[in-house]
Image (cartoon, rainbow, N blue to C red):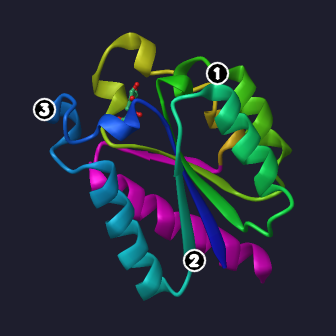
Amino acid sequence: MRILVLHGVNLNMFGKRDPSQYGTATLADIDAALKKLAKELDVTVECFQTNHEGEMVERIHKALGEGINAVVINAGAWTHYSYALADALAILPVPVVEVHMSNVHAREAFRHHSVLAPVCAGSVCGFGVESYLLGLRAAQTLVIKDAK
Ligand code: DQA
């Protein structure tokens, strides 16, 4: 099983960015924790980060022909306004799980709405790095359930 993990805008700054919201783990730490869990779950994980919306859209398009079984995405601020990303994710015939490090519902009003949510199977937020790990478990569960 192949799961693509997508990190959006500004997420390369985890570790240096507002530790009261995002903790001190770097993106490399997060990717390492995902790879470790992937090994335990016997899934293959590929991680990708970009600060360019078009590049993210193109990575999602590329996933179509790659035999990706599910996507886990933290789109950062794009979550709240990028219809381009929502449209790109909607093209994929596989489950998409939305994740956030912080509890977006306990923060500013603009973070309460996700334009990606309608094209996602569900979302996990507020648990720091654990949000990604729970998201990976959820994605695997969805793929297994779908295969039955
Ligand atoms: C975030 C939450 C977003 O609102 C914010 O713009 C981010 C990070 C999170 O992981 O908590 O960049 O996606």
- Looking at the image, in which quadrant does ligand 1 appear? top left
Question: Magenta span has 22?
Answer: no
Q: Amino acid at mark 1?
A: Ser
Residue 111 locus on image (x, y percent): 42, 20
Q: Which mark is residue 20?
A: 3
Rendered residue at 30%/35% (across/down): 13
Rendered residue at 73%/46% (across/down): 60
Residue ID for mark 1: 82
Mark-to-mark CA distance, 2 and 1: 28 Å
Residue 61 locus on image (x, y percent): 80, 45
Does the image show residue 70?
yes
Q: What's the magenta region? A: 121-148
Report the mark closest to the observer, 3 or 2: 2
Q: Horizontal placement of 12 versus 117: left or right?
A: left
Callout 2 touching callout 1 (CB < 8 Å): no
Callout 1 touching callout 3 (CB < 8 Å): no
Which quadrant, please, contains the C terminus?
Answer: bottom right
Does the image show residue 118?
no
Q: Dot 3: what SS?
A: helix
Residue ID for mark 2: 44
